[in-house]
Image: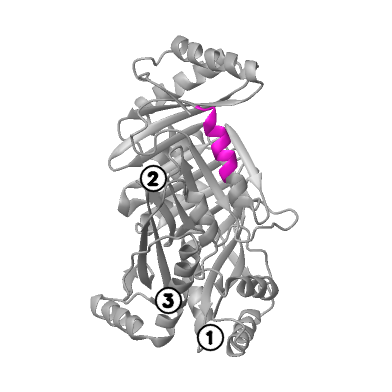
Amino acid sequence: MTVLALDPAAQNSPAALAALLAEVRTAAARDGTTRLVSISLEVDALDPLAVLESIFEPDERHFYAERPAEGLAVAGAETALSFTAGGPERFADCRRFVADTLASAVVVGDQSAPLAGPHFFAAFAFFDAAEAGAPFPPAGLFVPRWQVGQRDGRTVAVANVAVDGAAATGEWAERVWRAHQKFRAFDYRSVASLGREPAAAGLTAHPVGAAGGYESAVREAGARIARGELDKLVLARAKEVAADRPFHPLVVLNALRQRFRDCYVFSVANGRGESFIGATPERLLRVERGAMLTEALAGSVRRGAGASEDAALAAELLRSEKDRREHRIVLESMVERLAGLGLTLEFSDRPGVRRLANVQHLHTPVRAVLPPGMGLLDVLARLHPTAAVGGAPREAALRAIAELEPFARGLYAGALGWVDARGEGEFFVGLRSALVAGNQARLYAGAGIVAGSSPEKEFAETELKFRAMQDALLPA
């Protein structure tokens, strides 16, 4: 990767940008390659979701993620470069694509600023193979043309251009220049009408699969656990929902971000009118400054009506032998998977309680320093899918899920996030989610089954988890 010592604020004119792109075009033509040019510009505070609203097109890809409680938000739209993969080597294939792209990339701007430089937004499905007609591939990466990110109180706008020997450099210079002018003096009034559009109404819902099918699957999972075939199995349900008018993915996002400030609120669009949207509590992996952070999140109970009931429920969760066993299975599976990479893991031997808007979970953070040469995607390949969303032992659990669930998971419980030019990034798990297309949505929710699990209680837990998306699809 070539980092040019140019100040994009000082060089921010169509002529200067055209000269830069023309120089890259000459090199690309000489080598017969396509080169990524990434230009980062720090700007005054912006709301990335408002920016995405201003450039949203249903036939263009986008990626959005926000964790309000941490001051993190990032949006990317349209496609400069993309890559898909499938099969057992999908993570390794994606890592090679990232490395090959960065080897010839040209970047401009302060790369030390948060969320600066080219980002590879990624969505890995739960399984490494996809069913025919799936809306998303088993692994999909894209570098957006336009990106705005906010972290630690700083906002950075990024423009990415794929330049080959035939690139219209003058046209792209104009587009990048106009985008930077827009981001430096953003007019929120130009997109304020989105929130005033009529919301979807007349919501109807019906389960996917036969009546009583989930309880039957839980009983079958319990029988396999009793026979020693499994220690834990996560079984999910799906609901089909329809409304009297199309759902707008960004209206749904706005509803989620208001309610779930401690979660990752996200939307991944495939550019064909389908978006995977949700508010997930679970960080899968974060790599920053040579260290990785993940977490075991398993075992749950509802929130209380007041402080006393809330605390009583949390204490009950901490004492629950069934929930502590479920949590321990997830943690031990994660430790075993990461130990295979030779990592020295740091974590507490006693879980804490993580409180969300409508549920409480047992929670254990896990940290490790990464050795030189080990990247985020190397660790991710070992972690995904964790026992928190699949089960243990892993391979037996994956086979059981495919047999017992009457639908394809797709991105549900998949790994969503990004890798940057330093090999750092952040991934979360696609939970509390829905696949939205037009006026139709498929909602997903799951529960962990261990010895002693009750089919009725697990069904009730999934109903509680469905509420997050149901309320966002039809806000009051």
Quadrant of the drawing holding the C terminus: bottom left
- The colour mode here is one colour
- Which circle, 3 or 1, is nearer the viewer? 3
The residue depicted at 45 percent of the width and 60 percent of the height is 342
Q: Can residue 117 be seen by looking at this rendering?
A: yes
Q: Where is residue 434 in the image (x, y as percent from the top left)?
A: 56, 59
Which label's residue is closer to the chain start, 3 or 2?
2
Q: Compare residues 236 and 127 and report the one nearer the observer.
A: 127
On residue 305, the disc is none
On residue 73, the disc is 2
Q: What residue type is labelled 2?
A: Ala
Dot 2 crowding, Cα within 10 Å, few <14, some 14–19, many 20+: many
97 inside magenta stretch = yes
Which label's residue is closer to the chain start, 1 or 2?
2
Q: In this view, does 164 lie to the left or right of 352?
A: right
Q: What residue type is labelled 3?
A: His
Q: Compare residues 165 and 257 and report the one nearer the observer.
A: 165
Magenta stretch prevailing secondary structure:
helix
List the residue tagged with mark 1: 456
| Residue segment shown in magenta | 95-105
> Are circles 1 and 2 on residues that touch, CB within 8 Å?
no
Q: Which amino acid does label 1 sit on?
A: Glu
Q: Is mark 2 on a helix, strand or loop?
A: strand
On residue 327, the disc is 3
Q: In which quarter of the image is residue 350?
A: bottom left
